[in-house]
Image (cartoon, rainbow, N blue to C red):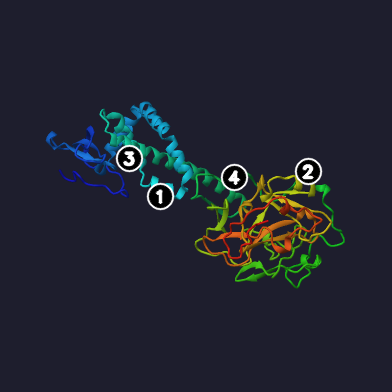
Amino acid sequence: MKNKKKRTSIKEIPVVCDVNKILSYRLNPASPKVILECLVEWANAGPNSNSWEGMDNLRYNLIFQEFIHNEFNKHEMEIFVKIANFKQKLRSKIRKIYNENPKWYIMHSIVQPFDPFEYKAHQVFYHLIKNIPEKFTILLEELVIKNYFFKLEQTQRTKADLIADKMSELEGITIVIDNEEDFELPPEFEYITKNFLVDDVNQSFVEEPKDIPSGCKCVSCGPTSECCPMLASEPFAYKEANKRTVIGLKRQEAIIECNENCKCNKKCINRVTQQSRNLVLCLFKTANRGWGVKNADRKSVIKRGTFVLEYTGEVLGNHEASKRKVHSYLFDLNMERNNHGFYTIDAYKHGSLARFVNHSCEPNCSMWFINDCLKNPKNQKLCIFADRDIKYDEELTIDYCPRYDVPTSDQIDYSQKFICECHCGSSLCRGNIY
């Protein structure tokens, strides 16, 4: 028979070939392994040409696929009960695998190779064949475990993609989610792109004097014009570098940007954190530091001085901040440490991708304070800029407690309330974050 036993590659489009009908089924009696076989009636051939063909030959044959699907649907309830019993029996083993191994090991060493259709075929044969050898039961147990983690990873990926799409839409950049450590999703929180004030925060704010203009009247803003930074007695922060606008300050200072009261347009060089960005970032699960953020753009690095993310959340006053129990998402909103008020951003329940940026004692990014020329505390922002070029697949990190940012004695000293061990891995590691 022509092409009677032609093998079909996994990359080929399924074809009917010359199979006419599946007549019967069995396990190969001569093989020490479990090999599913079907008695095939060939098209345009007599009964003497019927032959037993294994799964390798039939996997992508449409007649065989139809046979498996029909038999599965016909006996679906009975098969479901048998597989449910397998899962109950294997529950402890599955839990042990889940708890003791990282996801990447489970998927590459335990699950793969795995073919959902072949799993369905084995379920059908296990139900149809009367005398089941022990080796078939052992194999099906392995397939049940493989399928459990295969489905778990599929569900995780589907949900993670939906979360990433929503983040990308709100943040205005491309965000992907990757977790090779376990089957968890990022923690739930409300994604916001702007800070909002809690009810009692106004009691903590001390308004700045109103004796300066609310915005500049520049035609073309720059370091030599009477732009907002000059009106606020602050240095001009930005400069052009290779057709990019980057931060030009050598040390951490307050950045004064133009605002809605200025005469300049949205493309102004002094509106960096208000403009769109061309970034690809990945929210990923680390081995020992929870979730982190890394550069996922294969084609370009994040250049030194580039604005990356804004750290958003609830703006709290002194009293409310002292009551919050989850300290890892609190960031002080004061650039100048004084007695004129103390404000904090809490990104625990409401925040942006920046809430996942991890600490390092040798960071590649820094947090900068952004405001307008009025220096209204309500308009203060925290924004992350790259300190150096950040390559593809490199994690973005900041120093959670830089030396210039240590609270003075007359302010809240969170470091006295708890100690957080550092796992940044840098040769300059201080041992503790706080």
Whether pointer 1 and pointer 2 mark residues with C-beta atoms closer than 8 Å, the reply is no
What is the distance, in whole Å, between disc 3 and disc 2 at their CAs? 59 Å
What is the distance, in whole Å, between disc 3 and disc 4 at their CAs? 35 Å
Q: Earlier in the sequence, mark 1 or mark 3?
A: 1
Residue 256 seen by the camera: no
Residue at image mark 1: 108
Q: Amino acid at mark 1?
A: His
Whether pointer 1 and pointer 3 mark residues with C-beta atoms closer than 8 Å, the reply is no
Q: Amino acid at mark 4?
A: Pro
Viewer-side residue, 183 vs 91 = 91
In the shown orientation, is residue 287 left or right of residue 202? left
Q: Which mark is residue 289?
A: none
Q: Earlier in the sequence, mark 3 or mark 2?
A: 3
Residue at image mark 4: 187
Q: Which mark is residue 118?
A: 3
Q: Earlier in the sequence, mark 3 or mark 4?
A: 3
Residue at screen point 58% across, 65% down:
427
Viewer-side residue, 182 vs 127 = 182
What is the distance, in whole Å, between disc 2 and disc 4 at their CAs? 25 Å
In the shown orientation, is residue 320 left or right of residue 40? right
Q: Earlier in the sequence, mark 2 or mark 4?
A: 4
